[in-house]
Image (spheres, rainbow, N blue to C red):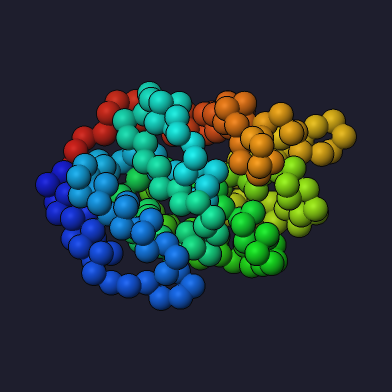
Amino acid sequence: MGLAFAALALAGHAATVQEQALPAPYARWQSSMESFAAADQAQPPQPGGVLFVGSSTIRLWSDLREDFRELPVVINRGFGGSTMDDCHYFVKSLVLQYRPRHVMVYAGDNDLAEGRTPQQVLESFRAFAEAVRTALPDTRISYISIKPSPLRAALLPRMREANALLAGYVRTLQRSDYIDIFTPMLAADGAPRAELFGPDRLHMNDAGYDLWRSVIGAYVAQDAPPVHLSAGR
């Protein structure tokens, strides 16, 4: 896809998002989708980049582009409070339209906090992955495991169950990774490492993001192109 065509496609998507109201229960993300569409209209991202999508853990990663500055294109499409189900519902506008080389997904802990089961998280991710694989068969898909936060320590058993289900499913996919950030975020006693989190005990501080960068970096690097992608790829 050429840059001019990509820009026209993104502009058309922006108009569609702004004109159409979203159905419940997705209407709460109307302003987020409009903000993404406006950003795309102002500066359309080039295809062939690495796209991060998911909940507030992605949205609040303010140094994401700087942390992976060696990559040609890094796109942040995190929207706070979102679920894996939300990511699947919006997969066309959040992922497919950008034609990324690699998709990094972080979502699932909000699903569990809202009462969904580990199996439901798996089914939402399965639907997301199938949509990406169908439209973009060469795109790599990496699932970042549900993180253990002090605020949600009571959900640790369900997080472990969900992570195990997701890891098992990802192993059946080609060009896919399960990235375990759950284990390095636990202390020796099995509790979440409080020093990786801010005052709300849910969202990470700089130390938490430094850990994520060190773990995720290896997965990004293994799929990095040897040269910059051409505009038409």
Q: Residue at x 78, y 48 (%)?
A: 153
Q: Nearer the viewer, residue 25 or 5?
A: 25
Residue that lies at the very extreme toward the left in this rendered image:
4
Q: Nearer the viewer, residue 111 or 70?
A: 111
Q: Residue at x 31, y 30 (%)?
A: 72
Q: Report x, y in % for residue 26.
A: 45, 69
Q: Is residue 34 shown above or below 40?
A: below
Q: Report x, y in % for residue 21.
A: 32, 72
Q: Report x, y in % for residue 183.
A: 73, 37
Quarter the C terminus occupies:
top left
Q: Is residue 174 shown above or below 27?
A: above
Residue 123 appears left or right of 21: right
Q: Nearer the viewer, residue 62 or 3?
A: 62
Q: Report x, y in % for residue 66.
A: 41, 26
Residue 136 seen by the camera: no
Residue 143 seen by the camera: yes
